Amino acid sequence: MKCLNVGANFVKHVVCIAQIVVVAAGVDVNIYYTYFICDLWSTNEIKMQSHEHWVAIGAVTDMFEREPVRGTFDEWMSNAWNDFEKMCLQIGKHRYIMVTAERECKKCDEFDDAVEKARLMEMCGELGLEPHEFVEMAFNRYKIQCLKKD
């Protein structure tokens, strides 16, 4: 597969969002250490490290296939990309909070609902998510994960 000549920044954004989509789909990958490698300056070949990347790229491709192409590339991209990027960022924040809070929770001797709800609410505030809605929607799943034995 050849890289399209769309610029390195666009490729980096697709990679970042694709990795978040993979995480949101429940595939256990580390966003920070898995990479989609595209050498735009030499071979122009895309090297994928795992099947999960193809699943994520397929999701992004499907999204763009449904978007009508109008105006300049920048106009089209800003219309097609902004809502998708916001949604994926929210998914990434959600996943980060759940995993990080769970890690902290498992350091404790016992599970205290009030302490754990406060932990989740604080993290939501730090990342700009609505804390009450997050806790209402995610707390039971979070509690189950925290109480699981490794």
Image (tube, helix red, strand yellow):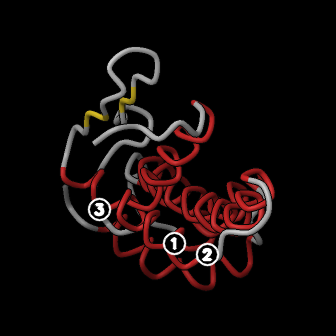
Tell me residue 148's x, y (percent): 25, 67
Query: Which x, y percent locates residue 44?
Result: 36, 27
Q: Indicate the position of residue 39 as horizontal and vertical percent values.
A: 40, 22
Q: Amino acid at mark 3?
A: Val
Residue 116, x across and y down, in percent: 57, 64
Q: Is residue 17 left or right of residue 50?
A: right
Residue located beneath label 3 in the image: 55
Q: Residues within 10 Å of mark 2 (few under 14, many from 20)?
A: few
User: Which label is found at residue 67?
Assistant: 2
Q: Secondary structure at mark 3?
A: helix
Q: Nearer the viewer, mark 2 or mark 1?
A: 2
Are discs 2 and 3 less than 8 Å apart at CB? no
Checking the image for residue 63, the label placed there is 1
Q: Is residue 119 above or below residue 45?
A: below
Residue drawn at the location 19% of the way across and 52% of the way down:
51
Give the image quarter of residue 71.
bottom right
Mark 3 crowd level (few <14, some 14–19, many ≥20, 10 Å Cα) = some
- Dot 2 and dot 1 residues touching (CB under 8 Å): yes
Is label 1 in a helix, a strand or a loop?
helix
* Outermost residue, top side: 42
Q: Report which quarter residue 120 is drawn in.
A: bottom right
Given the image, on which type of amino acid does mark 1 rest? Met
Q: Upstream in the sequence, badge 2 or badge 3?
A: 3
Seen at 65% across and 76% down, the residue is 68
